[in-house]
Image: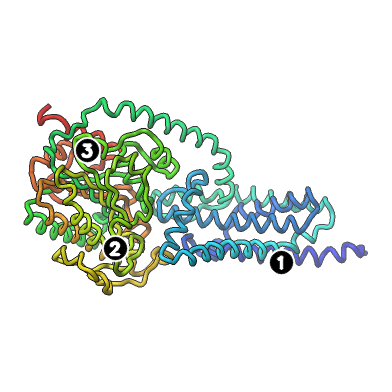
Amino acid sequence: MPSQDATKERPRLSRALLFALALHALLAVRLETESGSYWTALLRPTPDLPIVFACAFAVLWLTRGPRLAALTFGLLALLWVGLRGGSSFTERVYARRFDLYDDLELVPGLLHMFLHELPRWQQIGAVVGIVLLLALAVWILARLARPIFTAPKRRAHAALGLAVSLLLACGALAWMPAPEAETGREMAFAKEARFGVLPRYAIQIVQIPAKRREVEAFSQRLTEVAKDAWRHPRDLGRLKGADVHVYFIESLGRSLTRLPRTAEAFEGWLSELERTAGAAGFQAVSSFIAPSVTGGMSSLAHAELLSGVEIPTRRLFMRLINSKLKPLPHAFLAAGYRTADVQPAMYVPWPIGMAMFGFSDPLFLNELNYEGTTYPWGTMPDQFALARFLQLRPQFLDVPIFSMFVSVTSHVPFSMIPPYFADWNAALEPGAFDVEPAERFDIDFHTFMGHADAERAYLAALEYSFRVLGGFCEQLERPSLVLVLGDHQPPDLGELHAVDSSFDVPILALANDPALLEPLRELGFVDGYLGPPDHPSMPSYEFLNRFLAATSGAEGE
């Protein structure tokens, strides 16, 4: 006959198994950014959950404390879900793998993206609420897991649970099928995904010392580039003192040219731009350029173009900011220009960045002094920001000007399209933008991925951006070169995202003096507002030195 202890043991083990299955069913729920169905996740083995159990059973074996083991399970299970979210978000938005060493620094930026429209007290309340919700989630998971760790009454049973968990993890690693994927980039992510989330990031933790060495090597390279930069031509003599405006259009990517319906819309905007700018005496050449980022992180794309070094991560960006490198605006300062940085979404002063990049005149949110309907991300419409820049420009008219404008209207979530004023002076009249947007879409930062109207809203925002660009060209009376380019491809917008896995963005040069376009032709730009479909792209970090070489010295040297 079975002993009394064995009789009591069976219900505890059955209850533990039931709770383990319930936790698996709960943790298999798909996050909004994750691909695949719930049922697939429920039935497909993954090493992550057995690894979490193994760690918890190891704590139980070492401490013989079921509460501590359950708390360990809750913390690690929540970490697993968080890493799943980080992985799927960066893959869908930034089209790359999540990296613990580099991407944990992005968490404050993501909080800003989702909460910046709220008053400060609500932002603080939201952060506190998030922390409390995370603590509550850990507590709930620990409570659900406690019966699993109170069932083993002996140290040998804890060791058995640890061994079984490790066997399950190894078994899942050995035969877990890769998720289905179509594009090459998704195939690479799927191939990696079959090994589970936690093993991938455990490997990343081991690799952190190597990554630190890479960052230090980057800093050393910056020092060498800074020493070498001024040995090359940078006098900008072929520009003949013309104004130069670098005009970044947010989320403008080459993918627009790959899908027939979006290509048709894009060509329509360019035809209208050609009509408007052409009437103001502008001609154009065009090409494609490839930044190191896609889907987001615009500041890295701006810095890469201006600095001439590859900057794929925020950590490298911060090393650049603290370096002695002298990016493109410094060449214009040395040539007698004023340099203006027009960034409507920059809401705080940035003296260290202005000094490093070489901007003499920052025109940020506070300097632009917008009062009107609040638009997502950049607060103000692109037209207002540019109109204010043109209004303030007389203080620069004694010398040529170099400016960089970072647009905001076509930023995610593309939910509000401003009215456009044919008379740009009217855009600065008090109350001009105290009106409803010209068009609204029921999209926000939380819902744009997968939203049925996301592509339509994105196209409407870009149409507005090109209309503003044409109007801006109409306002330029002095000899001017306008370099227009996307900062990066758009984030995941369904079919539009799938048709082009490159990081390429269009780059367009417009000038009201034909001679200003000749150096661009020497760089491989072709006549017209859009390069041919098979036109190659130039790495963004190569543009600086090639542009300086082409525009410096006398023609023909």
Which secondary structure lies at badge 1?
helix
Q: Amino acid at mark 2?
A: Tyr
Considering depth in this image, is 463 or 182 the residue closer to the camera? 463
Q: Is residue 543 left or right of residue 99?
A: left
Give the residue at x 21% y 50%: 484
Sort mark 1 into few (<14), some (14-19) or many (20+) by Cα contacts within 10 Å.
some
Do tag 1 and tag 3 residues touch (Cβ < 8 Å)? no
Which secondary structure lies at badge 2?
loop
Which secondary structure lies at badge 3?
helix
Q: Earlier in the sequence, mark 2 or mark 1?
A: 1
224 w.r.t. 318: above or below: above
Q: Amino acid at mark 3?
A: Phe
- Foreground mark, 3 or 2? 2
The residue pinned by badge 1 equals 18
Give the residue at x 39% y 49%: 184
- Foreground mark, 1 or 3? 3
Q: Is residue 37 left or right of residue 308?
A: right
The residue pinned by badge 3 equals 332
Q: Alpha carbon of mark 2 to alpha carbon of mark 1: how far?
A: 59 Å
Q: Alpha carbon of mark 3 to alpha carbon of mark 2: how far?
A: 29 Å
Q: Amino acid at mark 1?
A: Leu
x then y, percent, for residue 511:
12, 47
> Which quadrant, please, contains the N terminus?
bottom right
Sort mark 3 into few (<14), some (14-19) or many (20+) by Cα contacts within 10 Å.
many
> Which quadrant, please, contains the C terminus?
top left
The tag on residue 370 is: 2
Q: Earlier in the sequence, mark 3 or mark 2?
A: 3
270 w.r.t. 543: above or below: below
